[in-house]
């Protein structure tokens, strides 16, 4: 039903009107008119009164035989003959049959021949109405006169029927309305008022005839006076059709009391339904509307379901739930309430109602939908256990949607079941996979150790292959695997070797070294680098000029201070040192291997031993572990780096080399923070310099304050370090190494490291630290390892604040030229150091972007 007005159909109104009209016709046909006061010999068909009896009769076929029966009943053979002739003239194919034929035969045999007239001449019209009706031939005046004069009910009925014969409903109604205003006989008025009442009822259903408000009011009043149940039904249906439910209820209640019980109950049900819809859907009065629903149900109606659906469609879910609860059919009620709760987001409540019912297939389907909704709710709430449990139930019910399968894959990834997660993600991978699935695929396969399968899977999905390459490039950048980063960032150049020539110069100076007033160094270098498939090869040559300054004549140098020792030789002030270096670096997704060998410093007072290095770094999702073995020259002073000549004996000593083991684990404590450890132990020795050992440990916590795409960062955090040497060999007399070797060095401070740029045309890095330190240098013999006497060096303590800072930058001037610069400073109590440098890199192939190792030269240890 689309609207309240459609509750009453046009056929229903037609049926009511036809029943009323048929009752009028049967009343006319069965009128007992005793004009000639003769006994009836033939009984006409029984008079039928009331709508309920008419509904079972068949429709009349052929001519109207009521007047024929009328005259047969009264024994008026003349009128029977005339009427018979008239009917046969108007219906040539018709002849009396059955009871009518037998009645005519009996009447003809018992009376005179038809056609004879009484001897006394013509009868009065009221005495012979049939003749008057025939002679009138449609004259309204004669017929109206008969209604005025004749006080016989039968004559009045027949006269009115003749007057209205063949006229339209509107004309008949106009005629009786006009007659009602005349002075008629008692019988005439009774018949006219009766016919007007029924014509008015019939006109109600005719759209071409409109009754005036006065006519309707009179009609309603007359129906109430008559207690006409059929008319009350008609009024009720019409009120319902106009959407006036309250008025319809009044008439249907009257019809029920006036004998139309069953039909009235149907009307009451529909009227209460219309009222309920208006109260709930339009007025929003749910309590009153629910009472109307219950009243409709009492009368046999079932409005709750339709109203419930209307509320559901309009988004009034709580009201829909209450209305569906009134539905008599348990399956419909559960289904409607389940949908209402589902729409309102009450998935658990809906599931409890629907899933235990098992009443129908659609309830089972709704149950499945609700399980999926609860499943989504659990996932959104990050309730992994509930998500997993519901997901397994959904899977047992049959095939699942890709969305459910994806969430299950993410949940399995959360609980660490990487193999199962990878299997589920694998089923979702394809050429049309949606964006956002790639991180789960990569993470599950990598953590399950199925790298090779992941690479094969990426071949079937371009989006996965691109994401995997970008993700690996970003990870390589963050891990410092810049060669691998370049390979992944520029896959089109993977199979080609990238050659780069480089050159540069730098200078440094320090103040406060023991035994010397000044130390400075100038360096130039050239290098050649090659990168292909993650393998980088560096070859470099460097010349260094170390200027140790001119020591004073009383400076504690060599064997000075020994009894009887005088200068016989000039100590070295400068040294020109040549070095070469070959380094190999292999970068893969989960590890980096590096090895190098160098000549060591040559050209000074003492040639240094060859340098070397080997390291391996392993990467996991949240940890990095590096282990290294390194041998390199100490550069604290000219004595430590290139050796010195004793001014007393002319002997050469120094050139200290340190061989150490390093262990550097890093543990990520969050997405952008972590803790790193640096543990070292080294062995130091040089020519005529006693062996020494160094132990050191440092703990750093760093937090990335501004993480950016591409690995750029702004990291800061506290650190604490501790360093200890076995012997203090910091001085410059013979046997000492001239390198910093405190008994204890403890520092607590704050560090920072910032890297930024657009990775195409420029890069910049600034890093440094500030710390409070406490240094204790142990007492030391004057000539360690020489079995000579002399005044020992005293123990010393130093406490204060120090710090360092370094800036590096690189510019891609052109696709074949990169310029870099660097500068730095370090300061501590009784010590200052500075350095500056610049370099050029000339890629032989076009370089489209920069990488952080462009900030460093071949000999720089990163």
Image (spheres, rainbow, N blue to C red):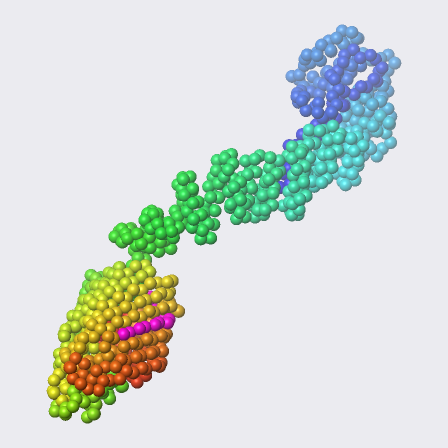
Quick one: which residue is furthest to the top in this view? 109
Vertically, is 430 above or below 93?
below
Decide whether residue 246 is among the magenta residues.
no
Looking at the picture, tell me which residue is in the foreground, 321 or 731.
731
> What's the residue at 17%, 89% (across, down)?
562
> What's the residue at 34%, 47% (across, down)?
420
Q: Magenta region: which residues?
A: 710-724
Looking at the picture, tell me which residue is in the foreground, 861 or 820.
861
User: Can residue 787 be seen here?
Assistant: yes
User: Can residue 466 be seen here?
Assistant: no
Q: Image quarter for residue 729?
A: bottom left
- What predominant SS class does the magenta segment belong to? strand
Q: Looking at the figure, which quarter contains the C terminus?
A: bottom left
Vertically, is 552 above or below 711?
below
Q: Residue 304: x, y in percent?
A: 61, 39
> What's the residue at 82%, 24% (across, down)?
156
Q: Residue 819: x, y in percent?
A: 25, 76
Q: Residue 600: x, y in percent?
A: 15, 75
Q: Looking at the figure, which quarter contains the N terminus?
A: top right
Q: Image quarter for residue 771?
A: bottom left
């Amino acid at each position: 039903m689309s609207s309240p007005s459609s509750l009453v159909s046009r056929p229903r109104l037609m049926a009511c009107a036809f029943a009323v009209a048929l009752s009028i016709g049967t009343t006319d046909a069965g009128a007992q008119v005793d004009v000639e006061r003769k006994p009836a010999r033939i009984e006409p068909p029984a008079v039928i009164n009331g709508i309920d009896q008419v509904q079972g009769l068949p429709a009349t076929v052929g001519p109207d035989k009521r007047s024929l029966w009328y005259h047969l009943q009264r024994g008026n053979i003349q009128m029977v003959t005339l009427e018979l002739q008239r009917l046969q003239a108007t219906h040539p194919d018709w002849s009396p049959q059955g009871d009518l034929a037998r009645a005519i035969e009996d009447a003809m045999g018992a009376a005179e021949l038809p056609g004879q007239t009484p001897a006394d001449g013509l009868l009065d019209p009221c005495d012979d109405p049939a003749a008057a009706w025939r002679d009138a031939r449609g004259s309204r005046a004669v017929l109206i006169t008969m209604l005025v004069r004749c006080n016989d009910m039968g004559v009045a009925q027949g006269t009115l029927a003749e007057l209205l014969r063949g006229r339209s409903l509107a004309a008949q109604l106009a005629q009786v309305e006009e007659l009602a205003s005349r002075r008629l006989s008692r019988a005439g008025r009774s018949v006219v008022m009766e016919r007007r009442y029924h014509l008015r009822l019939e006109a109600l259903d005719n759209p071409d005839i409109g009754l005036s408000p006065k006519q309707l009011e009179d009609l309603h009043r007359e129906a109430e006076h008559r207690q006409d149940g059929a008319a009350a039904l008609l009024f009720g249906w019409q009120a319902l059709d106009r959407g006036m439910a309250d008025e319809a209820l009044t008439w249907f209640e009257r019809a029920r009391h006036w004998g139309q019980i069953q039909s009235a109950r149907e009307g009451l049900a529909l009227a209460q339904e219309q009222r309920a819809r208006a109260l709930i859907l339009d007025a929003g009065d749910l309590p009153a509307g629910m009472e109307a629903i219950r009243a409709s149900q009492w009368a046999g109606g079932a409005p709750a379901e339709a109203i419930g659906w209307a509320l559901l469609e309009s988004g009034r879910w709580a009201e829909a739930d209450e209305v569906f609860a009134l539905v008599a059919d348990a399956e419909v009620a559960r289904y409607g309430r389940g949908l209402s709760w589902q729409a309102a987001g009450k998935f658990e409540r809906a599931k409890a109602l629907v899933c235990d019912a098992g009443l129908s297939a659609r309830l089972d389907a709704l149950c499945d939908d609700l399980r999926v909704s609860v499943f989504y709710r659990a996932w959104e709430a990050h309730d992994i256990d509930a998500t997993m449990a519901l997901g397994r139930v959904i899977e047992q019910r049959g095939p699942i949607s890709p969305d459910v399968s994806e969430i299950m894959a993410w949940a399995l990834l959360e609980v660490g079941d990487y193999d199962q997660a990878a299997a589920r993600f694998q089923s979702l991978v394809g050429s049309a996979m949606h964006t956002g699935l790639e991180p789960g695929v990569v993470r599950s396969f990598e953590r399950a150790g199925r790298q090779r399968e992941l690479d094969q899977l990426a071949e079937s999905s371009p989006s996965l292959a691109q994401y995997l390459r970008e993700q690996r490039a970003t990870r390589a950048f963050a891990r410092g695997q810049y060669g691998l980063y370049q390979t992944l960032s520029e896959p089109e150049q993977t199979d080609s070797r990238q050659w780069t020539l480089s050159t540069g110069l730098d200078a440094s100076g320090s103040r406060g070294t023991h035994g010397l007033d000044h130390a400075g160094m100038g360096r130039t270098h050239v290098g050649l680098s090659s990168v292909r498939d993650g393998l980088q090869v560096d070859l470099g040559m460097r010349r260094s000029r170390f200027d140790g300054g001119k020591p004073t004549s009383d400076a504690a140098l060599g064997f000075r201070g020994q009894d009887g020792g005088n200068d016989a030789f000039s100590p070295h002030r400068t040294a020109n040192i040549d070095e070469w270096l070959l380094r190999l670096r292999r970068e893969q997704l989960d590890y980096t291997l590096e090895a190098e060998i160098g000549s060591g410093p040559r050209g000074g007072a003492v040639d240094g031993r060859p340098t070397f290095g080997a390291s391996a770094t392993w990467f996991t999702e949240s940890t990095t572990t590096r282990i290294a073995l390194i041998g390199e020259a100490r550069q604290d002073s000219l004595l430590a780096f290139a050796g010195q000549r004793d001014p007393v004996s002319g002997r050469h000593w120094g050139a200290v080399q340190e061989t150490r083991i390093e262990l550097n684990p890093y543990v990520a404590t969050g997405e952008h923070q972590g803790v790193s450890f640096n543990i070292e132990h080294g062995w130091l020795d040089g020519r005529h310099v006693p062996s020494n050992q160094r132990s050191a440990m440092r703990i750093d916590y760093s937090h990335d304050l501004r993480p950016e795409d591409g690995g750029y960062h702004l990291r800061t955090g506290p650190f604490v370090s501790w360093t200890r040497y076995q012997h203090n060999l910091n001085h410059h007399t013979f046997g000492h190494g001239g390198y910093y070797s405190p008994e204890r060095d403890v520092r607590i401070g704050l560090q920072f490291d910032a890297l930024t740029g657009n990775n195409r045309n420029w890069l910049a890095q600034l890093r440094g630290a500030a710390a409070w330190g406490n240094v204790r240098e142990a007492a030391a013999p004057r000539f360690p390892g020489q079995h000579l006497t002399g005044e020992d060096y005293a123990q010393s303590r130093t406490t204060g604040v120090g710090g360092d800072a370094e800036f590096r930058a690189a510019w891609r001037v052109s696709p074949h030229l990169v310029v870099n610069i660097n500068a730095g400073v370090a300061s501590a109590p009784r010590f200052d150091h500075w350095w500056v440098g610049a370099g050029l890199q000339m890629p032989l192939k076009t370089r489209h972007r920069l990488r952080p190792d462009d900030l460093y030269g071949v000999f720089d240890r990163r």
